[in-house]
Each structure stands twice: as structure tokens, then as C-alpha cells.
Image (tube, helix red, strand yellow):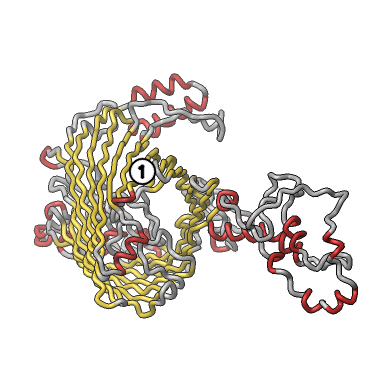
């Protein structure tokens, strides 16, 4: 984009010269207009030595600073004036302009700086069609001894699955029978509905403008319009806080979709501003970044920017940071301060909405984090050249972060009565009383955590080996949010590792192997802390490690059912073949992944077995303008489409325990686990 603007400015600077040179001469004008064109190209008379048009001549090779006398025009102009017959005889030659007349004024050396500011716009629009079948893994088909399906929530919650059950299973209208008058009714013995399929489509329009006010400063931002909006979720007259449209008595008569408005017909606004930050770069001193920005490290196991076209989660930090670079060794280094949580502020909705400067009320309830990093990253052009020479490129680095919190106000803000008292008091102007309410409700957290994360990458012409390893050590006095603040005395010790290997024996074939490990917790029921931090047997060690939810391993089990990889390890062999692979052009590929998942601590699973399941996923993908180099910062503009199918086969770790299977009085002995399936289609455009 910057090159385009520079070219436009260059052409614009030449337009006056071209326009003057192509003007038809009058009968009294000289046929050789070179001298006149040189002066006419400037916007100021030759008597002004500061004029940019007066400095270079038509050839750009010197200057003529002799002042012109308007009263005495140059005598040689009359001496070279041709006669009418000479002009007629010279007509064919006059149609060809002199080379000097069409030579544009040379571009100034600071053209790029003068052409700024530059605005770049990037992003994508995507639409996804998704079908989920049996994501409850058979737990919503549980029957009692009489063979009647159980509809109570308690029975399903016994599965420990975070997946939200299809509500169709709670109604009996599917099996209602009409009487003689055609009136449907539900009897006590009417069986419930049996629907294990959920189907939807959603969309997102991502807008990422960049502003370059000067060549060393960039302002970046990210906005999502209709972010993951479920199509058909905002119909005219439906779900609008009890207010019906006069044009649609109910949803069936809806003829249009209404813009999403938080609190009225959705829980999310139409436009979400997710990021905005600035970067000021000096080639010698480094880069200063400040604002709300993405954070991505290594493979994205722990910190993941979530910028992929199929992403749904992100790591976004409020940060002030510095990054330097020592180019001879390709070293980068830096440090940052993160504002993770600032607690309650003085903002008041009724008194100064959208105005004034709110401030952080308490310093003790804040969560602070500092981090430092160092790494080696070969410049992208040097990396391409080295790989072309069949050399091996090694990149890597690490970061260390430390975060801490003394008190917590979560108990006040989570309690509706206390939160209402606090907010109402601030709105009414009783700021001191409200501050006292918040202060009295503060709980002692007294927590700290130290995290170290290392990453390495080994690249060859036909292979890639990349890994990441992280460890967190910390302490938390209390996980309780009440002012009483019981002493839990939790120690934190969590470990995670990830390895990716890729081989391309032929240009169109790619063979991959991914392996990952996340430490589990033998004293917790479940593979993550979705049910809280309660520990069995008085244990005080929190050891479950969690991957970032946007690090995608599969299509069903970890992505949707569990929502996040944690407390387990996996193996994923894959193969991809490019049926069409035009350089910087069309790409059509097929891919197959097989994922085997096992729990790190078998006793933390529902079935007390380590084996969780095996999943097989298949993908067909098309891109109209694919870039082969994965290190390109952005995908090329163009159209893309993807179709996917996945099936997950649950293993004993996801079912009832063996003793429940053998208990004749237990309903769980009759439970049959069901494979989960998904079908996905993604359509989109990069720009």
C-alpha cells in the first residue's frame, strides 16, 4: 500500500510537466519548448531560488539561477522563430515532443514521508455452517429401569461434560397426542423428545485498519462487526425484552433481521472494538508499543493472538512495552508492564456518561504483571535465502513473567445485592459510602505466579521441527471471594509441552506429527477447573495446566465438548496433499488428522480410565490467492472455502465407572456411549 501511495505521488508531481509539454504551441511560439517547459514545471517563478521547480532543469541535472527580466525577453527567442512555410514543412517533426519536455521532475528524496499519512485496511469476512451431532456423547440418552429417557438436569450433569445439552430433550411436545377435538396434550407417561443434533450458521466481519501518520509510527486496531452472530438470532419482533414489533406478532411472521443491540435482542453489540495500540519504531533504539494489543508467543500454546480466519479466542493485553533488536545476530529483546485487572473504577453512568476521566479506586485489588523476553529470529528474507541454499535455520527464545495480587473485589462484584448497592451509591453521588461498601467486601487473595516459556524452531528445505515448553510456579492464600477469606494456601505447579514435526518428501505432500502434554490434577474431579478449585483429601497443590483455547487440536472433543485442552496428552499424525498448488495462486488441498487423547491423571476422569477417545477429521480447503510461505504476516487477499467432517469415538474415560456399570440398581449400567460427529463449511474473503 505504501508503494502504491509513493507511485501516485510521483505521478502527481510529473503532471504539471506533462500538461505543459503537451499544450499545442501558438503560431508565435518556439517549436523547441524545452526551456519554457523547465520553468513551467515549477510552481514559482525563477526569481525565487527556494522554489522546487527552479532548482533542477528539464533534465534534472543542474540549475539556472540567472534572474529573468520581464521587460527584456531573451533576444535569441526572435532569432529562432520559424516562418509559416518552415512551420508547415516541419509539421511531421513537430508532432514528436522533445525528450526533455516529457521528462518529469525527479521525485524528492523525502517523497515517502511527504506522501504520508497512509491508511491500510485488512481483515476478512467469514460465514460458517456447523452441525453438531451427539456432542453429549450419549449421556442425554440415559434411561431409567423402565426404559424412559431421563430429562432432569442433575442426571446429565453427572457426566461432568461442559457441553450445554440440547434443550429439545427437556420437552415432551414431540410425542404429544391429539384428542378427538385435535387438541394436543402431554401426559405423565409421554416420553420426551429425542434430538441430539444442533445446526447453525454464524458470521463475522473483521476490520483491521492501520494508520501511518509518519513513516516510523503506526496505529493499529481491530474491530469485529457482527462477531460470531448466529444467523437468524435477531428476528423482527423476537426476543426484544418483551416488546413486540407491530409488524410481526411472533417470530413466525418476521420478515427481516434487526441489528444486534446489547440487552435488547442479544448479549453482544453489533460492533466490538477489541484492540487499539500504537507502535513507535526507531531503527537504532527499537520499538515502543502501548495500548490494548495482541500477544502471541511461539506456537500459541499459552499466549495466542487468535488471528486465524477460523479463530474464536484471543490473548489481548493492556500493555506498555519495549522491544529492541540487534540485527547482526538476529536477536530481539524486550520488557513490558501489563494491566491485567484494575478492579472497580469511579465511572458513573448517570452523571458523566462518555465524558470525564474515571480512575481506579483501589490499588490493592489490582492484578499486575511484568514480563521480559529474549529470542533469535532470522530475518524473513535471509531465512528464505538460506532455505533455498538447503541450509538449516534455527530460531528460538523465551520469556519470563511475574504477576501478583494482594486483595480481590470479585466477591463484591459477583454478589448482586452488594454490586447493586455499590453501583447505585456511586450513581447517586454517595461515592464515599459506596467506596466503604467495596472496601469492607474486599477479600485477601495474596497470590503470585512466575511463568517461564521457551520456544524453538528448526527449519529445513523439506522439514520443520518446532516446540514449546512452559512452567508456572506460584502461591494463592485464598481462592475464596468472601471477606472472611478462608486460608486455602494453594501452591501452583503446572507444566505444559508441545512438539510439532513436519516433513515434505515431495512438494505437494505434507506429513505432520503433533504431540502435546498438559499436567493434570489427581485431587480434582474433571480435566480442568470448570467446577472450581475444590481439592480432595485436603490437597493444596494446583497442577492442571491449560492450553490456550485457540490452539486447535481437533474439531469435536477439545475444541467444542471440553472447550480447552488441559490435564491430558495427545498424539496427532496428519497428512495433507495439495491437488492444485499454483505459486502465489490457487490452492486446493485435502487433509486427514487422527487424534488420540489420554488423561494425564486417570483418576480425574469420569470413568477413572486414562483413555478419553479417538477422533478422525477430514478437511478440503480452497484458497484463490494462497501464499506458500507460512511466515508471511498476513494472508493474501482473495476468496477461501473449507469443508470439514469429524467423528469422535469416546473411550472408557468419558463413560461411567466400572463399579457403576456392575451395579444393577444404577441407571448407568444401561448407558451406551455414542460417537459424536460434526460437519462444517466455511466461506470467506480476505482483504
Write down the residue under mark 1. 323
Q: Is residue 145 left or right of residue 350?
A: left
Corner quadrant of residue 611: bottom left
Q: Residues within 10 Å of mark 1 (few under 14, many from 20)?
A: some
Depth order, front residue of 618/420: 618
Q: Nearer the viewer, residue 555 or 386?
A: 386
Query: Is residue 226 depicted above or below 334 in this figure?
Result: below
Residue lying at 19% horizontally and 65% vertically, measured from the top left: 596
Q: Residue 373, how many percent across, how many down?
A: 28, 44
Q: Quadrant of residue 363?
A: top left
Q: Is residue 181 visible?
A: no
Q: Secondary structure at mark 1?
A: strand
Q: Residue at x 44, y 44 (%)?
A: 281
The residue depicted at 78 percent of the width and 66 percent of the height is 32
In-image side of 73 versus 166 (left or right): right
Image coordinates of residue 590 in percent, x first then y, are 33, 76
In this view, the residue in front, 46 or 678, is 46
Residue 365 seen in this snapshot: yes
In the image, residue 459 sits, relative to residue 579, either above or below, namely above
Q: Position of residue 406 (x, y in %)?
A: 28, 28
Q: Is residue 636 left or right of residue 441?
A: right
Q: Position of residue 57 (x, y in %)?
A: 68, 56
Amino acid at each position: 500500500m505504501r508503494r502504491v501511495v509513493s507511485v501516485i505521488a510521483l505521478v502527481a508531481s510529473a503532471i504539471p510537466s506533462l500538461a505543459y509539454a503537451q499544450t499545442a504551441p501558438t503560431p508565435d511560439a518556439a517549436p523547441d519548448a524545452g526551456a519554457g517547459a523547465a520553468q513551467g514545471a515549477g510552481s514559482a517563478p525563477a526569481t525565487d531560488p527556494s522554489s522546487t521547480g527552479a532548482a533542477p532543469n528539464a533534465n534534472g541535472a543542474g540549475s539556472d539561477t540567472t534572474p529573468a527580466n520581464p521587460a527584456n525577453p531573451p533576444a535569441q527567442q526572435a532569432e529562432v522563430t520559424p516562418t509559416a512555410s518552415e512551420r508547415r514543412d516541419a509539421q511531421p517533426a513537430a508532432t514528436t515532443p522533445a525528450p526533455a519536455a516529457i521528462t518529469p521532475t525527479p521525485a524528492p528524496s523525502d517523497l515517502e514521508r511527504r506522501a504520508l499519512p497512509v491508511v491500510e485496511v485488512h481483515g476478512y469476512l467469514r460465514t460458517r455452517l456447523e452441525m453438531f451431532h451427539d456432542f453429549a456423547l450419549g449421556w442425554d440418552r440415559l434411561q431409567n429401569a423402565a426404559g424412559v429417557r431421563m430429562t432432569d438436569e442433575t442426571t446429565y450433569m453427572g457426566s461432568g461434560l461442559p457441553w450445554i445439552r440440547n434443550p429439545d430433550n427437556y420437552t415432551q411436545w414431540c410425542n404429544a397426542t391429539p384428542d378427538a377435538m385435535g387438541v394436543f396434550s402431554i401426559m405423565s407417561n409421554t416420553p420426551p423428545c429425542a434430538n441430539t443434533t444442533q445446526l447453525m450458521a454464524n458470521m463475522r466481519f473483521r476490520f483491521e485498519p492501520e494508520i501511518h501518520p509518519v513513516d516510523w509510527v503506526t496505529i493499529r486496531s481491530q474491530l469485529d462487526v457482527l462477531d460470531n452472530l448466529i444467523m437468524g438470532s435477531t428476528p423482527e419482533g423476537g426476543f426484544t425484552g418483551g416488546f413486540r414489533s407491530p409488524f410481526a406478532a411472533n417470530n413466525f411472521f418476521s420478515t427481516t433481521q434487526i441489528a444486534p443491540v446489547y440487552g435488547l435482542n442479544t448479549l453482544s453489540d453489533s460492533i466490538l472494538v477489541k484492540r487499539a495500540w500504537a507502535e513507535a519504531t526507531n531503527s537504532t533504539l527499537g520499538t515502543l508499543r502501548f495500548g490494548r494489543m495482541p500477544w502471541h508467543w511461539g506456537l500459541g500454546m499459552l499466549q495466542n493472538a487468535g488471528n486465524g480466519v477460523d479463530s474464536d479466542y484471543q490473548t489481548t493485553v493492556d500493555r506498555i512495552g519495549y522491544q529492541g533488536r540487534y540485527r547482526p545476530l538476529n536477536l530481539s529483546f524486550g520488557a513490558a508492564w501489563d494491566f491485567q485487572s484494575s478492579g472497580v473504577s469511579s465511572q458513573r453512568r448517570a452523571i458523566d456518561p462518555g465524558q470525564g476521566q474515571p480512575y481506579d479506586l483501589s490499588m490493592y485489588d489490582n492484578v499486575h504483571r511484568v514480563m521480559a523476553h529474549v529470542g533469535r529470529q532470522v530475518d524473513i528474507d535471509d531465512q528464505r535465502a538460506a532455505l533455498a541454499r538447503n541450509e538449516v535455520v534455527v530460531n528460538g527464545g523465551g520469556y519470563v513473567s511475574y504477576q501478583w495480587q494482594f486483595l480481590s473485589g470479585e466477591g463484591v462484584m459477583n454478589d448482586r445485592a452488594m454490586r447493586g448497592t455499590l453501583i447505585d451509591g456511586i450513581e447517586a453521588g454517595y461515592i464515599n459510602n459506596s467506596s466503604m461498601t467495596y472496601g469492607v467486601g474486599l477479600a485477601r487473595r495474596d497470590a503470585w505466579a512466575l511463568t517461564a516459556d521457551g520456544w524453538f524452531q528448526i527449519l529445513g528445505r523439506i522439514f520443520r521441527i518446532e516446540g514449546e515448553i512452559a512452567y508456572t510456579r506460584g502461591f494463592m492464600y485464598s481462592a475464596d471471594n468472601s471477606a472472611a477469606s478462608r486460608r486455602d494456601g494453594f501452591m501452583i505447579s503446572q507444566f505444559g509441552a508441545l512438539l510439532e514435526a513436519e516433513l515434505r518428501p515431495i512438494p505437494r505432500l505434507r506429513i505432520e506429527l503433533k504431540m502435546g502434554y498438559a499436567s493434570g490434577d489427581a485431587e480434582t474431579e474433571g480435566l480442568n477447573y470448570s467446577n472450581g478449585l475444590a481439592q480432595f483429601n485436603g490437597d493444596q497443590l494446583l497442577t492442571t495446566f491449560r492450553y490456550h483455547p485457540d490452539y486447535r487440536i481437533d474439531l469435536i472433543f477439545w475444541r467444542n465438548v471440553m472447550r480447552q485442552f488441559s490435564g491430558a496428552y495427545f498424539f496427532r499424525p496428519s497428512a495433507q496433499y495439495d491437488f492444485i498448488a499454483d505459486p502465489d495462486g490457487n490452492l486446493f488441498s485435502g487433509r486427514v488428522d487422527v487424534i488420540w487423547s489420554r488423561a494425564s491423571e486417570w483418576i480425574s476422569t469420569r470413568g477413572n480410565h486414562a483413555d478419553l477417545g479417538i477422533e478422525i477429521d477430514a478437511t478440503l480447503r480452497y484458497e484463490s490467492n494462497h501464499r506458500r510461505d507460512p511466515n508471511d504476516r498476513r494472508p493474501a487477499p482473495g476468496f477461501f472455502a473449507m469443508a470439514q467432517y469429524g467423528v469422535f469415538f469416546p473411550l472408557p474415560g468419558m463413560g461411567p465407572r466400572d463399579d457403576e456399570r456392575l451395579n444393577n440398581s444404577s441407571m448407568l449400567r444401561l448407558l451406551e456411549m455414542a460417537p459424536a460427529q460434526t460437519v462444517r463449511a466455511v466461506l470467506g474473503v480476505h482483504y
